[in-house]
Amino acid sequence: MNAPRVPLRLLLVGLAVLLAIPACTAEPAITPAGPTELPPEHTTAIPTAPDPAPIGVSTALMPTRLAADLTPGRALADPALLQPANLAYLGAFRLPLPAGSSSSSWEYSGQALAYFPAGDPAGAADGFPGSLFGTGNDQQLLVSEISIPAPVISKNLAELNTATTLQAFTDITGGLFNLASMDLPIADLAYLPPLNGSGAGRLHFVFGQHFQEFEPSHGWHSLDLSRLEAAGPWILDGYTNYVTSDYLFEIPADWSRTVLPGQRLATGRFREGIWGGCGPALFAYNPGDELNPPAAGAAITEVTPLLLYGAQEPGLPDILTAADRCLSDYQAADHWSGGAWLSASDKSAVVLLGTKALGNAWYGFANGVVWDYDCADHTPPTCPEVPAWPNENRGYWAQDYQAQLIFFSPADLAAVARGERQTWEIQPYATLILDETLFDPQINPGSYKRDLVGAIAFDREHGWLYLMELLADGSQPLIHVWAVTE
């Protein structure tokens, strides 16, 4: 097992990325984040800057990007790549309403989603078989299983079908994590079929939080939530939680078998600010045999970085200062929150879902007040007055936001896995803007909506992509559905 890096070195990483930000974004330098304390009700509060333009923020917005405008000519012509045009919108459905006796609910949720092919075998024959596992309230992150009703294309909530509960909310970690004490917890889920056809398959999980360095984060639970049967947690050897502990999804068996045998799951994280490099990270890893899992606290050594911009750990320092080692249009206020490996016949794409920051970004408060991270060290201190609610939450902000799916080439990721390309060289070849399909595609001043979208899950057999829009049904998410076609 590699020796963990000390926190001081982690701070040096952040400083190096900080120095790189102007070259990556052509925006003013953004200072490191301090803890963001959110209102007690929940943790999704991010109102945007109101009009007129806030202090220190330009009124010029970044032009809205069109789908596929990041695509090099090679990618546009590559018949093996799925394009945004291969996604056909099918509509949305609602999540179950809170039950009085339930230990949790879908309110303020949307962190995690996983598709289970054999779920809900007695469900309606509506063309959408299987079930979905997801986490509820973002302060509890308990797991529930729901049915999948037929989606409906309508912006009228009353016309949408509603999922039913198949398994009630449960703490699948059995105390492996103290979820109640975690600072802004994050999570995701992924179903993985049994290895070599033996066993039942497992519901894999990852749990993380706002500030953490080297802590066990990944594991699995049985598909039966009524009895505790968990393994883990494990840590991805040599890499910090700032780049590993958020989204989680299955790698197609043929790609894994050909490129990285045994590494059947993909995981990663984009930590806003400087803590995780200057773009979303992605790793392939081997979770082991479900019949003989790694011991609790073990380090998973079969780990391969596929995307790592400006590199966090390990690696360091010289690669952090070049402008060409950031994600295209990187902003410290971006939020990449979910991922899936899509396929349709002989076409494929790896997609990451997120709320993209547009225009100028700053560290401070939602109303545009900029906070100098070193302001308290000045003589006299130069820290601005903290604004009144609802703008008192300190963090990274931007002038505008947009819900996006960004597309990566599996062939490019294979080249990284083989050592033929560097992790920071891979850029998205296409972008799908989702705002037109969302019920509430705005982050409004005074609202509690921090992000537009959350988690995604993919039914590979039928080609259905499930995507969670946050706070679209009152305090609950909606699930949107796309058909992924050839």
Image (tube, rainbow, N blue to C red):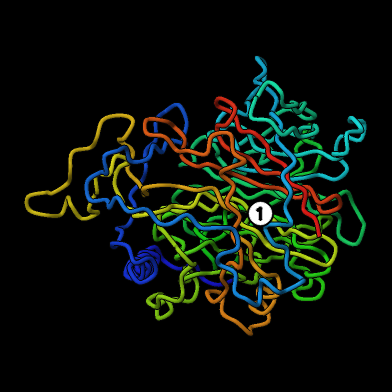
In percent of the image, x 64 and y 52: which residue is there?
Answer: 233
State whether residue 387 is above or below residue 206. Answer: above
For disc 1, the marked residue is: 248
State which quadrant residue 416 falls in.
bottom right
Could you tell me residue 207's position as x and y percent? 59, 47
Could you tell me residue 71's position as x and y percent? 59, 69
Could you tell me residue 159's position as x and y percent? 71, 23
Mark 1 Cα within 10 Å, few/some/many (few <14, many 20+)? many
Residue 296 at least partly seen = no
In percent of the image, x 75 and y 64: which residue is there?
Answer: 348
In percent of the image, x 37 and y 76: which residue is there?
Answer: 321
The N terminus is located in which quarter?
bottom right
State which quadrant residue 378 falls in.
bottom left
- 300 on left or right of 375: right
State whether residue 146 is above or below residue 68. Answer: above
- 407 on left or right of 385: right
- 125 on left or right of 312: right
Secondary element at image label 1: strand
In the rendered image, the residue lying farthest to the top is: 100
State whether residue 353 is above or below residue 446. Answer: below
Residue 53 at least partly seen = yes
Depth order, front residue of 28/88? 88
In the rendered image, the residue lying farthest to the bottom is: 420
Could you tell me residue 221's position as x and y percent? 75, 45
How many marks do you count on the picture? 1
The C terminus is located in which quarter?
bottom right
Depth order, front residue of 144/336? 336
Q: Please, what is the three-letter code of the amino acid marked with disc 1?
A: Leu
